[in-house]
Image: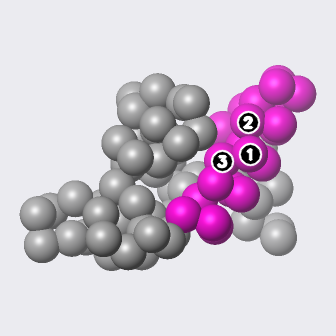
Amino acid sequence: MKDKNKLFISELAELTGLKFTTLKFYVENDLIPFEQESTQARRVFNKVASVKRIKEIVKLREKRFTIDEIKKKLSNQ
């Protein structure tokens, strides 16, 4: 992607070391917001905000929080 602060999910997976399917699961469960759909019908993510959010999710998952609990915690921020 040309804009260095915008990423597709595959680029986000590569950057964070998480599997594409894991990130897709988080997106589908509204844990990682995306900014827009590209003209190629692909989701576009803000690099800085998404990486920060993913780090928060990973920390909470390591502490054994459920997806619903994580969703509540993140919505309170």
- Residue type of the residue flagged with mark 2: Val
Query: Disc 3 marks which residue?
Result: 54
Q: Which residue is mark 2?
A: 58
Residue occupying the point 82% across, 68% down: 76
Q: Secondary structure at mark 3?
A: helix
Q: Residue at x 63, y 66 (%)?
A: 48
**Residue 55: image tag:** 1
Q: Quadrant of the N terminus?
A: bottom left
Kind of residue indicated by mark 3? Ile
Q: CA distance from mark 2 to mark 3?
A: 6 Å
Residues shaded magenta = 47-68
For residue 17, side relative to residue 65 (left or right): left
Give neighbour class at mark 2: few <14, some 14-19, many 20+ (Cα, 10 Å): some
Name the amino acid type tagged 1.
Lys
* C-alpha span from label 2 to label 1: 5 Å
Do the residues bearing badges 3 and 1 touch, measured as CB atoms within 8 Å? yes
Q: Is residue 52 left or right of residue 37?
A: right
Secondary structure type for disc 1: helix
Main SS class of the magenta portion in the image? helix
